[in-house]
Image: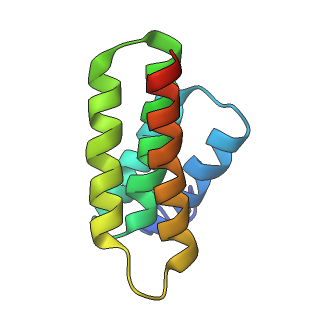
């Protein structure tokens, strides 16, 4: 990220990796927001943002995070290309996980 701060992919991959390594969701959001700023047509970045917001909803129980999770999942789904079948499946799986979580908590 430091060496090429104008490429969204670096910010997006960094955010995704940080999220997987359980970095603070607020730190991850800063990176994914920058990725979206640089490339607002990339479905993956909206999906990653949705995952982070979902984690914040689980941690803090604030409905605004859940609402924004759903908005970002819808945006991600709308931006997927026909060749992004695995990403689309991941987005749909996340929708299902949200439903399950909301129904059981």
Question: Left or right: where does residue 54 sit relative to residue 64?
Answer: right
Location of residue 6 in the rendering, given as x and y in whole percent from the top left corner = 40, 66
Asked if one can make out residue 71 in the rendered structure from this viewpoint, the answer is yes
Farthest-out residue, front: 103
For the rendered model, the colour scheme is rainbow
Residue 56 appears in the picture as rendered:
no
Name above or below for residue 11 compared with residue 89.
above
Is 76 rendered above or below residue 102? Answer: below
Question: Looking at the figure, which quarter contains the N terminus?
Answer: bottom right
Q: Residue at 34% across / 64% down in the picture?
A: 77
Q: Nearer the viewer, residue 69 or 46?
A: 69
Q: Is residue 78 left or right of residue 26?
A: left
- Viewer-nearest residue: 104 or 19: 104
Quarter-of-image position of residue 65: top left
Q: Position of residue 31 (x, y in %)?
A: 47, 45
Q: Is residue 42 above or below residue 35?
A: below
Residue located 65% across and 42% down the image: 18
Q: Quick one: which residue is furthest to the right in this view?
A: 21
Please report the residue visible at 53 percent of the width from the left and 66 percent of the height from the top. 89
Where is residue 8, by image quadrant? bottom left
Q: How many numbered marks have been drawn onto this rendered protein structure?
A: 0
Residue visible at 47% across and 58% down? 91
Q: What percent of the width, then of the height, locates residue 61?
A: 42, 12
């Amino acid at each position: 990220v430091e060496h090429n701060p104008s490429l969204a992919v670096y910010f997006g991959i960094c955010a995704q990796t940080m999220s997987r390594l359980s970095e603070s969701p607020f730190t991850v959001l800063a990176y994914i927001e920058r990725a979206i700023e640089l490339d607002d047509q990339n479905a993956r970045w909206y999906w990653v943002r949705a995952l982070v917001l979902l984690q914040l909803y689980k941690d803090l129980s604030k409905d605004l995070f859940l609402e924004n999770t759903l908005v970002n999942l819808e945006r991600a789904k709308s931006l997927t290309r026909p060749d992004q079948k695995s990403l689309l499946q991941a987005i749909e799986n996340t929708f299902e996980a949200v439903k399950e979580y909301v129904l059981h908590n």
